[in-house]
Amino acid sequence: MLEAAILVVFPVLVAFAAASDLLTMTIPNRVSLMLASAFVVMAMATGMPFGQFSLHLVAGALVLVISFGLFAAGWMGGGDAKVASAIALWFGLSDHLTGFLILTAFYGMLLTIALVSARQMPYLPGVLRRQEWALRLHDSRSGIPYGIAIAVAALQVYPQSSWFNWIPAA
């Protein structure tokens, strides 16, 4: 049961955050709260020592402070800041957190370049012209759904994280 939770909970919530950001340009607070709550439950279920648990909390708080600064500067949405912080809880103060942050920045840059380039097109092709989410993405006054970059980075790093030590080798 623990193995199933490790394989399902984090990836599904992170993927939902990305899809929500793509389609609505918002990440509901409940997604970040569920990620944070699931981390606490999984930490208890695995018997994570209090010292290690504390370092995970520090990682989440550190990312929250930094991402809130990016939000205040207008460079990141509030939902993006909250979900990145909740994801940081899962990685703790580790190389995995560093990798997650570097990949988030890299994928965020690629996403920004792609959207800015796509927004230079005078119109959307075919069926996309009838899709509200596509029109919103194409609008140059709209932001960048960084939740997508955050999720891709998180899903890339997660399988190398210490959570997978709980899954027996086949």
Image (cartoon, helix red, strand yellow):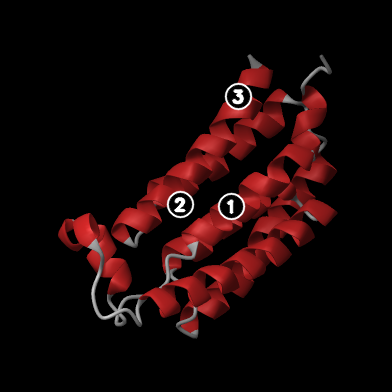
Residue 27 seen in this snapshot: no
Q: Give the residue type at disc 1.
A: Val
The span from disc 2 to disc 1 (Cα, nearest Å) is: 8 Å
Which residue is identified by label 1?
A: 152
| Quarter that holds the N terminus | top right
- In the displayed structure, 11 sits above or below 72; it is above
Residue sitting at 49 percent across and 40 percent down? 13
Q: Give the residue type at disc 3.
A: Ala
Instruction: List the single residue furthest toward the left.
Output: 130
Mark number for residue 5? 3
Label 1's element? helix
The span from disc 2 to disc 3 (Cα, nearest Å) is: 20 Å
Left or right of 138, for residue 101? right
Residue sitting at 69 percent across and 62 percent down? 103
- In the displayed structure, 81 sits above or below 37; it is below
Q: Give the residue type at disc 2.
A: Ala
Residue 83, given in percent of the width and then of the height, sits at 52, 55
Q: Do the CB atoms of the residues marked 2 and 1 lie less than 8 Å apart?
A: yes
Residue sitting at 56 percent across and 37 percent down? 11
Of the numbered discs 2 and 1, the one sitting upstream in the chain is 2
Label 2's element? helix
The span from disc 3 to disc 1 (Cα, nearest Å) is: 20 Å
Residue 132, given in percent of the width and then of the height, sits at 20, 60
Left or right of 135, for residue 144? right
- In the displayed structure, 107 sits above or below 4; it is below
Mark number for residue 119? none
Left or right of 151, for residue 21? left
